[in-house]
């Protein structure tokens, strides 16, 4: 399977609590729900199409617990997004989670990079990571991410966890596609290229 990441983030890189004020208040975060005002039909269509490519999902513990709390409540059979999220196999990378009630779920313990590399060897289309910023950064740094889909909202949140932490290893990316929805969301697809090259502007 290919490892594909999908992230909703602000212009200043915040990924925490995009969907509701109480989605994730850890660390004293008080600005949840910043993504919602920009939703539109074009965005929904793209996300549904992306999800249809998934054969399994991968989460970090915090994102998994939020999804496991909310998504099982969505039981409308005509909701393709909810049906996919609830039906497909899910993997959660955690050394502290003892039980997973959102079936079917497998808890990955130990060396998460090695475990995810093993999952990628299995047949299938996409192993999709949603949210899970800390996990995503580990997988990017390890060279395991094949595609990065970023949905950027035109807002500066000013606080909260960010996708790319200060002090992390540089990662080169190639822009594959880009579009802007009527609501102002920038949908950008990247593929990692490996090491970053550095130069001097105007230098020889």
Image (spheres, helix red, strand yellow):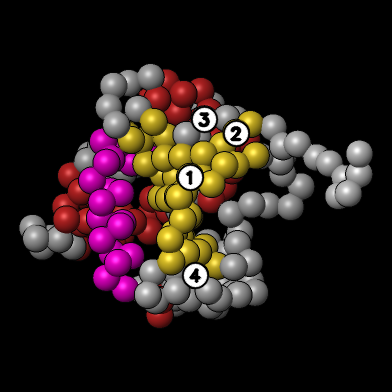
Q: Are marks 2 and 1 in contact (CB under 8 Å)?
A: no
Pick whichever of labels 4 and 2 is earlier in the sequence. 4
Secondary element under disc 1, as helix, strand or loop, is strand
Secondary element under disc 4, as helix, strand or loop, is strand
Residue 127 image offset from top left, x and y in percent:
35, 36
Secondary element under disc 3, as helix, strand or loop, is loop
Q: Of the residues tagged 4 and 3, which is closer to the observer? A: 4
* Residue picked out by circle 3: 144
Residue 14 image offset from top left, x and y in percent:
58, 64
Q: Of the residues tagged 4 and 1, which is closer to the observer? A: 1
Pick whichever of labels 4 and 1 is earlier in the sequence. 4
Residue 113 image offset from top left, x and y in percent:
53, 28
Residue 176 is tagged as 1
Q: Of the residues tagged 3 and 1, which is closer to the observer? A: 1
* Quarter that holds the N terminus: top left
Q: Rounded to the nearest whole Å, what is the CA distance between mark 3 and mark 1?
A: 18 Å
What residue is shown at x 28% (from left), y 48% (from top)? 51
Which of the 4 image quarters holds residue 139? top right
* Residue picked out by circle 4: 153
| First to last magenta residue range | 40-58
* Residue picked out by circle 2: 193
Q: Rounded to the nearest whole Å, what is the CA distance between mark 2 and mark 3?
A: 11 Å
Pick whichever of labels 4 and 3 is earlier in the sequence. 3
Q: Rounded to the nearest whole Å, what is the CA distance between mark 4 and mark 1?
A: 19 Å
């Amino acid at each position: 399977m290919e490892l594909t990441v999908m992230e909703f983030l602000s212009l200043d890189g915040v990924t925490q609590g995009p969907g509701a004020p109480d989605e994730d208040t850890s660390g004293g975060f008080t600005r949840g729900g910043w993504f919602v005002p920009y939703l539109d039909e074009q965005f929904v269509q793209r996300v549904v199409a992306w999800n249809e490519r998934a054969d399994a999902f991968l989460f970090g513990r915090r994102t998994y617990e939020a999804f496991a709390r909310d998504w099982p409540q969505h039981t409308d059979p005509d909701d393709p997004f909810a049906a996919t999220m609830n039906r497909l196999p899910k993997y959660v990378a955690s050394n502290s989670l003892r039980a997973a009630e959102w079936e079917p779920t497998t808890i990955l313990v130990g060396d998460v990079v090695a475990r995810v590399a093993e999952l990628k060897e299995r047949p299938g289309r996409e192993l999709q990571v949603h949210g899970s910023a800390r996990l995503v950064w580990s997988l990017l740094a390890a060279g395991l991410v094949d595609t990065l889909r970023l949905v950027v909202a035109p807002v500066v949140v000013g606080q909260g966890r960010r996708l790319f932490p200060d002090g992390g290893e540089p990662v080169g990316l190639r822009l594959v596609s880009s579009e802007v929805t009527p609501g102002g969301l920038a949908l950008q697809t990247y593929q990692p290229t490996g090491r970053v090259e550095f130069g001097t502007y105007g230098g020889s």
